[in-house]
Image (tube, grey):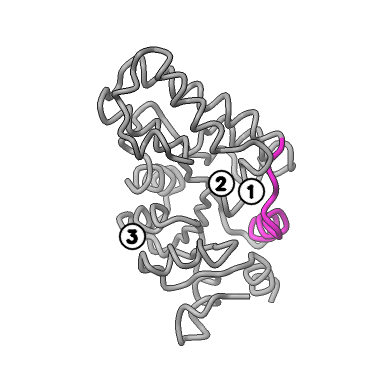
Amino acid sequence: MPFETENDPNRLPHLIRRARVVLWDFDGPICRLFAGHSAERVAGDLVSWLEGRGLRGLLSDNERQTLDPQVVLRAVDRRHPGSDLVAELEERLTQEELRAASSAWPTPYADPLIRTWTAVGSRLAITTNNSPRVVRKYLASRGLVDCFAPHIYGRTQELRLLKPDPHCLNRALSAMGAAPGDALMIGDAPSDLAAAERAGVPFLGYARNDRKAKFLLEAGAESVVGSLETLLKLLRE
């Protein structure tokens, strides 16, 4: 069921029909990566690891209390960009994401939507702030690698280029030879929307609950769906 984000009933079918290339965020639209492996605990473990090295002062009180491990990683990178410390912290997060991939929950209707979109001739890419190693592991477990490979663009050592920077979207568009206006970005966070806007790519929000929808709408998203079934039905029509 789409959220009431607009008055034009033709907007969503138009977005779907014109998309020659579909850029997917990973954690959210494709799966809930940390469904069985608490992101809050991972963030706490990263903070504890830093404190064990006498680096408590690198983080503000808010950053130490965050529920998001990416916040910890990016905070350290802002203070020590490109350092060995950041590289080690990033690898620790990647290992936690790899563990999480084994118990991730598929987003309802994501698998058939991905296969159907591929079958009708659209090309798909992943544009995510997660490790590309993690994405490949999850997609392989679902038999979906061939729907995306080789177009999986995830976190690199240059953390300043994570979304909302459009770097991963621009990499995908360049590699696929696609114009921004011929693409569609599907994401579940305001940072996805910001990256899409900066890349000139139309955006479709996915929100699994009202709280997520509220964040996207307040950020300016014009189209938000609460279920990927909506897109699957439009595509099959």
Q: Is residue 172 magenta?
A: no
Residue linked to disc 1: 31
How far apart are the alpha carbons under marks 2 and 1? Answer: 5 Å
Amino acid found under the numbered disc labelled 2: Asp
- The residue shown at (47%, 35%) is 69
Q: Residue at x 40, y 38 (%)?
A: 71
Determine the secondary structure under disc 1.
strand
Residues 23 and 214: in front is 214
For the residues labelled 2 and 1, say whether their Cβ atoms are less than 8 Å apart: yes
Foreground residue among 170 and 62:
62
Image location of residue 38, percent across then percent down: 61, 37
Q: Which residue is drawn at 70% across and 47% down?
A: 105
Q: Which mark is residue 115?
A: none
Q: Where is residue 47 in the image (x, y as percent from the top left)?
A: 44, 26
Q: Quarter holding the C terminus?
A: bottom right
Magenta span: 103-118
Disc 2 crowd rating (10 Å Cα; few below 14, some 14-19, many 20+) is many
Q: Mark 2 points at which residue?
A: 27
- Give the number of the mark in front: 3 or 1: 1
**From the image, which quarter does the N terminus lie in?**
bottom right
Q: Could you tell whether 6 is left or right of 102 in the image?
A: left
Question: What residue sits right under mark 3 in the picture?
Answer: 197
* Label 2 vs label 3, nearer the camera: 2
Residue found at the far left of this picture: 79
Q: In this view, does 101 lie to the left or right of 71?
A: right
Kind of residue at badge 3: Glu
Can you say whether 57 is above or below 195 in the image? above
Horizontal side of residue 97 vs 220, given as left or right: right
Q: What crowding class fits label 1: few (fewer than 14 Cα within 10 Å), some (14-19), or many (20 or more)?
A: many
Q: What element carries label 2?
A: loop
